[in-house]
Image (tube, rainbow, N blue to C red):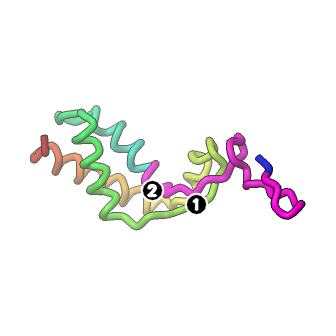
Amino acid sequence: MEQQTNGNAEQKPDEGHAHEYVLVNIVETLVKNKAKDLIKTIDMCQCNKCYLDACAIVLNNLEPLYVTTRRGELLSRVETIGYQYQSKMMIEVLKALNAVRKSPRH
């Protein structure tokens, strides 16, 4: 998309293109994916409220890790998180799911 300003063309950076870069908290994406998988394996409510409550608990206990990546290429950035951090994340997800299971807020 081009705009004319004083005779010079200005282009907005990659708006609406497949190669657009985005800023993402990769921890949030991984936590949501892990919680979605694990919630199915334990005896608890699987509604969206309980799922999001568990994700919020985890994300408030872990430090964010922001990355810039092209839209659609996020999962290829998983290697930026070390094994030890992934293990910590897994423990936090299980603890949060258990807490929500014991005290759902709906």
Q: Quadrant of residue 75?
A: top right
Please count the marks in the image: 2
The answer to which of 14 and 104 lies nearer the viewer is: 14
Amino acid carrying mark 1 in the image: Val
For the point 45% across and 56% down, the residue is 27
For the point 26% across and 56% down, the residue is 57
For the point 13% across and 40% down, the residue is 106
Which of the numbered marks, if any, corresponds to residue 27?
A: 2
Q: Which residue is mark 1?
A: 67
Element assignment for label 2: helix
The answer to which of 45 and 106 lies nearer the viewer is: 106
Element assignment for label 1: strand
For the point 17% across and 36% down, the residue is 44
Residue 54 coordinates in the image, percent (x, y):
26, 49
Residue 92 coordinates in the image, percent (x, y):
29, 56
Chain part drawn in magenta: 3-29
Report crowding for label 1: few under 14, some 14 to 19, many 20 or more residues within 10 A (C-alpha).
Answer: some
Q: Is residue 76 left or right of residue 12?
A: left
Amino acid carrying mark 2 in the image: Val
